[in-house]
Image (cartoon, rainbow, N blue to C red):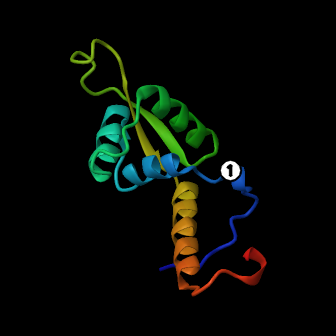
Amino acid sequence: MGKLKPMGNLKPPSLPTVLEEAIMLSILERPRFGQNIVEVVSAASDGTCQISCGTLYPALRRLENRGFIRAERSEANLAVRRGHNRCYYAVTDQGREVLNNLEAMRHQIKKYDKAPEFLT
């Protein structure tokens, strides 16, 4: 488990939401296209997290605008796709750092037996 690193100038609203984090984790190991992301998140959550296209694509745009993911258009199988490119999404180095920091933060929080005094 990595040590918690300062998140630079990322402010809490810039951190990914739970849904955005799930999306990022689904593309952490390899790039995926939209429908594949929906399927992976659904399967990984045993069907409890169903993402609609109306939710997925705005979340992908937010993640891309913050530099956490990148989108790449594929020219493969254009004939099958009636001339439309397929867009694949992948986590950037900055996105990996954010995911690592979130995991380290969870690990740090779990180490405490009780809440710090200022939270009680």
Query: Could you tell me which residue is drawn at 36 percent across and 22 percent down?
Result: 85
Q: Which residue is at the far top?
A: 82
Task: Please tell me which residue lies in front, 42 or 9.
Answer: 42
Residue at figure coordinates x 27%, y 50% from the top left: 46
Residue 68 vertical position relative to residue 114 in the rendered view, above or below: above
Work out which residue is located at the far front of the displayed protein and give it: 120
Q: Residues within 10 Å of mark 1 (few under 14, many from 20)?
A: few
Please report the residue visible at 56 percent of the width from the left and 34 percent of the height from the top. Answer: 61
Residue 113 position within the rendered picture, expressed as x and y whole percent measured from the top left: 57, 87
Q: Quadrant of residue 81?
A: top left
| Amino acid on which the number 1 mark rests in the picture | Ser
The residue positioned farthest toward the left in the image shown:
80
Q: State which quarter of the image contains the C terminus.
A: bottom right
Q: List the residue tagged with mark 1.
A: 14
Q: Is residue 3 left or right of residue 34?
A: right
Residue 19 vs residue 85, the one in the foreground: 19
> Where residue 7 sits in the image (x, y, percent)?
68, 65
Q: Is residue 73 above or below residue 113?
A: above
Q: Is residue 34 left or right of residue 111?
A: left
Where residue 4 appears, x then y in whole percent?
61, 76
**As drawn, 20 above or below 95:** above
Foreground pick, 74 / 98: 98
> Does residue 108 sit above or below 60 in this rendering?
below
Residue 118 falls in which quadrant of the image? bottom right
Residue at position x 40%, y 36% in the image:
51
Give SS at disc 1.
helix
Residue 94 in percent (x, y) is at 58, 57
